[in-house]
Image (spheres, helix red, strand yellow):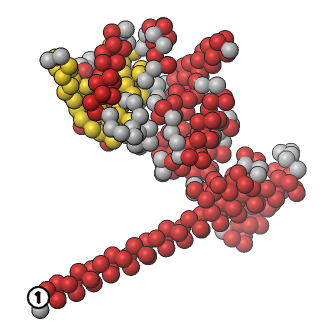
């Protein structure tokens, strides 16, 4: 009798969870459908105004049309149709003129996501944020933070030729395939660690462990923590990898070495040893070769260039414990992109 009662309770409990899952799934599908319908409406409105009234002309007549249209729509449908909303609609249709392109965007991103993307002028930069937001499932807040922190300019892909950027973004879009150039950044912003200017490597490592979730957020959502001070033994000598992660989409281990000073040539040999060990003893079937990330307080650019680290599985990046002036950072990153692309052009 007890067994029968227990069986009924289990059955009822399972029934509840099954029905709950169906309701949640239905709600999610409804939310996606509503979002797509709203975004399609805004795009259609913008397209109609652009093509049939403004003729892509932003003259005084166009402004009058927008204000008049806004007043009438507000009277009919409420304050959600102010002139700012209509201008967003117009911009939406300008940025995504073709139906087949915009349809893939509004199916996967909300209108709030789309608004954050509309005013990015560079097409490749905009496409980077679109594909990263879709693949990493960024919230609107996260997307805005990534744009404000100049993630694109800090990511290695921005320093590559346009054709490479296009190929990597296409692979991400069609195959959900992430390249290392889309993953690794320079610099990394670690202001959330709360470190003073005078800190040791141990202080840095400890602070990262305490703020591990924030650190992974800065690294990228596909990083999974594996170990701290991972001990490896080679010829009876013990070595310790500061931090070890696994990147799900790259399908490889990522060894992180923390350095409080500027990059030194000796760091390359040390990281190469770590990577060869991980490749021999830790890499599993189906995984890609391990990647090394050397995080330094400063970089010696000529050292890095002469050692051709960009051609190896070793990445070197600077970490910043306080956010710099945004204009200075923007100028610095744009300069770095120009120099990198200039070197690529000279090689060609």
Q: Across the whole image, how many numbered discs are drawn on residues?
A: 1
Left or right, 194 with respect to 306, comes to left
x and y percentages locating residue 280 in the rendered image? 30, 27
The answer to whether residue 107 is above or below residue 122 is below
| 297 relative to 109 in the view: left or right | left
Which quadrant is home to the C terminus?
Answer: top right
Quarter location, residue 249: top left
Taking the spot 33% from the left edge, 24% from the top edge, the residue there is 275
* Local SS, label 1: helix
Q: Nearer the viewer, residue 338 or 104?
A: 104
The one of 69 and 10 positioned closer to us in this rendering: 10
Residue wearing tag 1: 2
Picture residue at 73% right of the left edge, 49% below the top: 96
From the viewer's perspective, is 115 left or right of 66? left
The residue carrying pointer 1 sits among few (fewer than 14), some (14 to 19) or many (20 or more) residues within 10 Å by Cα, namely few
Which residue occupies 36% across, 9% down?
264
Q: Please say if 87 is above or below 262.
A: below
Picture coordinates of residue 185, whole percent (x, y): 47, 29
Residue 12: x, y in percent? 27, 84
Image quadrant in which you'd find residue 247: top left
Residue 140 vs residue 70, the one in the foreground: 140
């Amino acid at each position: 009798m007890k067994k029968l009662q227990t069986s009924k309770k289990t059955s009822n409990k399972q029934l509840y969870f099954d029905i709950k899952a169906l309701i949640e799934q239905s709600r999610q599908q409804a939310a996606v459908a509503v979002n797509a319908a709203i975004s399609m409406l805004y795009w259609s409105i913008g397209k109609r105004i652009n093509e049939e009234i403004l003729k892509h002309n932003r003259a005084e007549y166009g402004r009058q049309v927008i204000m008049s249209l806004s007043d009438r729509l507000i009277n009919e449908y409420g304050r959600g149709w102010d002139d700012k909303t209509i201008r967003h609609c117009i911009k939406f249709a300008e940025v995504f003129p073709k139906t087949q392109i915009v349809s893939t965007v509004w199916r996967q991103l909300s209108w709030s996501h789309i608004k954050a993307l509309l005013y990015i002028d560079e097409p490749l930069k905009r496409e980077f944020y679109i594909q990263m937001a879709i693949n990493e499932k960024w919230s609107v807040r996260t997307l805005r933070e990534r744009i404000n922190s100049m993630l694109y300019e800090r990511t290695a892909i921005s320093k590559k030729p346009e054709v490479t950027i296009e190929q990597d973004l296409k692979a991400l879009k069609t195959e959900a395939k992430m390249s290392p150039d889309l993953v690794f950044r320079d610099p990394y912003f670690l202001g959330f660690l709360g470190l003073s200017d005078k800190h040791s490597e141990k202080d840095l490592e400890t602070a990262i462990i305490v703020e591990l979730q924030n650190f992974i957020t800065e690294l990228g959502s596909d990083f999974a923590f594996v170990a701290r001070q991972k001990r490896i033994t080679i010829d009876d000598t013990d070595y310790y990898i500061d931090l070890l992660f696994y990147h799900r989409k790259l399908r490889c281990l990522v060894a992180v070495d923390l350095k409080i000073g500027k990059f030194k040539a000796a760091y390359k040999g040390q990281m190469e040893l770590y990577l060869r060990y991980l490749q021999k003893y830790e890499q599993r079937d189906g995984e890609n070769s391990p990647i090394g990330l050397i995080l330094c307080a400063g970089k010696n650019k000529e050292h890095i260039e002469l050692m051709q680290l960009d051609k190896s599985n070793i990445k070197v990046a600077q970490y910043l414990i306080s956010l710099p002036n945004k204009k200075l950072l923007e100028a610095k990153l744009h300069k770095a992109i120009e120099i990198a692309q200039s070197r690529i052009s000279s090689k060609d």
